[in-house]
Image (spheres, rainbow, N blue to C red):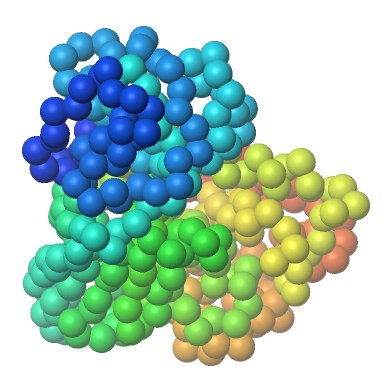
């Protein structure tokens, strides 16, 4: 199924080099140093937050040493012991070490390049990554190429980015509460385990619309089109990226005192509100409407709610207020889901229902 075809046309073992032989009988200080040394021989992880006893983690040969990476656990318990709510996890039998910081400076960066044939030209994508993450970088590079080709087909507009187009792994983005950021010049992604393929497809949309001023259009379309691209190309979601989870915070706010229209209040609301609105319109009118809004808001960066109402009227006729009320502008929700307005012509992937 081509979800964006217009009508007109996670625990992983990482290959980080040879592991050092670690004596399990070392004293705590020596053992902690050995754990860090075993990871990358340079102490990549710093600021030990906790060490927990967990011999049951070992289930088969090869489990003596595991690298999970960054994890957040609001429950704060593992192996019946209290653990920090977030940190970088490394297992050296029989203990988990949970570190507060990841230091990439010692491992160095490398570069991968890929030529991509687009509609009007062939460009080079460059992906700069930290050396232990080569497999991640190879996957993201291939996904970036497919994403750019799909977005050209979806918009009917040539790739507006620079050539070569640079993507760079940036471990500092999470400190700014960002998974990624992009413009026509370049893109940055948080490290593996934090950013995901959906981050990449989301940021790919921003290569086209990063100048769009209305956040509910700019970010909402990036979320929605990026999500549909994931299904278009069968990219794998991370385990926490279910649509229900993404929309959960918004659904607790809907029609409460904290609710507000997307126009002008997007930043005060859970991101799920904008995405549910655009998905609802997708169910009713399909990818053509999303594409038209993306193109219009790219050509007119001040594209606003009134402009959207005019464009939407080509699809919904005189009933645009019913669709926008409560969602984009102030008023009651006349339409809470697509079925409240009319038949669903474009079902969501995997029979997902909003």
List x then y, in percent, for residue 232. Answer: 31, 50
- Give the quarter of the image for residue 180: bottom left
Q: Residue at x 33, y 17 (%)?
A: 94
Pick the front one: 168 or 62: 62
Q: Quadrant of the N terminus?
A: top left
Q: Residue at x 29, y 69 (%)?
A: 168
Q: Quadrant of the C terminus?
A: top right
Number of dots carrying numbers: 0
Q: Residue at x 21, y 58 (%)?
A: 107
Q: Residue at x 54, y 65 (%)?
A: 176
Image vertical order of residue 281 relative to residue 128, above or below: above
Pick the front one: 111 or 26: 26
Quick check: 123 left or right of 190?
left
- Give the quarter of the image for residue 33: top left
State whether residue 240 appears in this view: no
State whether residue 290 appears in this view: yes
List x then y, in percent, for residue 216. Answer: 63, 68
Pick the front one: 115 or 44: 44
List x then y, in percent, for residue 95. Answer: 37, 22
Quick check: 158 left or right of 244?
left
List x then y, in percent, for residue 285. Answer: 52, 58
Pick the front one: 170 or 153: 170
Image vertical order of residue 111 relative to residue 273, above or below: below
- Give the quarter of the image for residue 28: top left
């Amino acid at each position: 199924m081509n979800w964006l075809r217009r009508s007109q046309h996670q625990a992983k073992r990482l290959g980080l080099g040879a592991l050092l032989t670690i004596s399990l009988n070392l004293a705590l200080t020596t053992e902690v140093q050995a754990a860090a040394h075993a990871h990358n021989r340079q102490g990549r992880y710093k600021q030990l937050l906790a060490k927990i006893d967990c011999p049951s983690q070992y289930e088969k040969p090869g489990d003596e040493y595991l690298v999970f990476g960054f994890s957040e656990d609001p429950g704060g318990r593992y192996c019946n012991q209290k653990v920090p709510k977030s940190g970088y996890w490394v297992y050296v039998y029989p203990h988990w070490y949970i570190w507060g910081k990841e230091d990439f400076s010692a491992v160095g960066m490398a570069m991968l390049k890929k030529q991509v044939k687009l509609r009007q030209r062939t460009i080079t994508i460059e992906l700069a990554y930290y050396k232990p993450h080569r497999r991640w970088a190879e996957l993201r590079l291939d996904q970036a190429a497919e994403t750019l080709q799909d977005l050209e087909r979806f918009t009917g507009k040539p790739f507006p980015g620079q050539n070569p187009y640079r993507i760079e792994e940036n471990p500092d983005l999470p400190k700014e509460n960002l998974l990624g950021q992009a413009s026509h010049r370049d893109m940055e992604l948080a490290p593996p385990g934090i950013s995901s393929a959906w981050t990449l497809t989301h940021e790919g949309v921003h290569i086209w619309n990063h100048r769009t001023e209305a956040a509910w259009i700019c970010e909402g379309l990036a979320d929605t089109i990026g999500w549909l691209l994931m299904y278009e190309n069968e990219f794998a979601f991370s385990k926490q990226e279910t649509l229900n989870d993404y929309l959960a915070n918004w659904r607790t706010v809907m029609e409460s005192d904290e609710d507000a229209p997307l126009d002008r209040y997007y930043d005060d609301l859970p991101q799920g509100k904008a995405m549910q609105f655009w998905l609802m319109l997708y169910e009713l009118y399909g990818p053509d409407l999303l594409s038209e809004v993306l193109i219009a808001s790219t050509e007119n960066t001040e594209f606003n709610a009134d402009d959207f109402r005019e464009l939407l009227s080509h699809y919904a006729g005189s009933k645009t207020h019913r669709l926008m009320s409560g969602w984009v502008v102030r008023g009651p929700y006349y339409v809470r889901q697509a079925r409240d307005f009319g038949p669903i012509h474009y079902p969501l992937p995997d029979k997902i229902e909003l």
